[in-house]
Amino acid sequence: METESKSRDEPLRVVLVELRSFARRLRREWSINVPEITFAEATLMSAVTARPHPTAVDVAADLQIDKSTASRQIAVLEQRGLIEREAAPGERRAQWLRLTPEGRNILQQSDTVRIEAIRDRVGDWTDAEVTQFADLLRRFNARPS
């Protein structure tokens, strides 16, 4: 069992290095290609769209960040007119979040730019390889942290 674990160490180091490289490239290219919002703002906005009626607590949990951090980022996006709040029916303090039409438009544009960049990077891959890559990423990200 220990030999199997050690035989995986080197490929796992490669995975770690490549994930770090991917994250750096994604953030760098993001700032060039999507100047309207930062990568972190797009991530938060995507979290808002992932649920029917998300609250700041939901977004913080989904992104695994502190609620105060999520609240500050939400407030900035709200001031910029990209997110709006609505009182949750039957709850005194809870507020549902949703993207404004402008927020949805900017997020959609940023997703389109990112998909095009990914399309360019996998341009010489077969459809089966792209599908396998997507399946493996989905499987990797589905595991609890």
Image: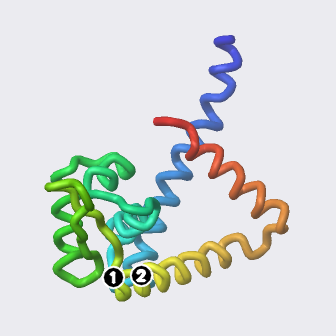
Residue 111 percent coordinates (x, y): 51, 77
Residue 76 percent coordinates (x, y): 18, 73
Q: Amino acid at mark 2?
A: Arg
Tell me how many marks there are.
2
User: Camera-side residue: 7 or 111?
Assistant: 111
**Quadrant in which the N terminus appears:** top right
**Location of residue 137 with respect to 125 vertically, above or below:** above
- Packing grade of label 1 (10 A; few <14, some 14-19, many >=20) is some
> Residue placed at 33% from the left, 85% from the top?
36
Quadrant of the rendered structure where residue 81 is?
A: bottom left
> Residue placed at 36% from the left, 82% from the top?
103
69 sits left or right of 11 in the view: left
**Location of residue 9 with respect to 17 vertically, above or below:** above
| Residue behind mark 2 | 104
Residue 125 percent coordinates (x, y): 79, 68
Q: Which residue is the extreme one toward the top?
A: 1
Disc number at residue 100?
A: 1
**Mark 2 and mark 1: span between their CA atoms?**
6 Å
Q: Amino acid at mark 1?
A: Thr
Residue 59 percent coordinates (x, y): 33, 55
User: SS at mark 2?
Assistant: helix
Q: Tell me whether circle 2 and circle 1 mark residues in contact (CB < 8 Å).
A: yes
Q: Is residue 32 visible?
A: no
Q: Is residue 136 visible?
A: yes
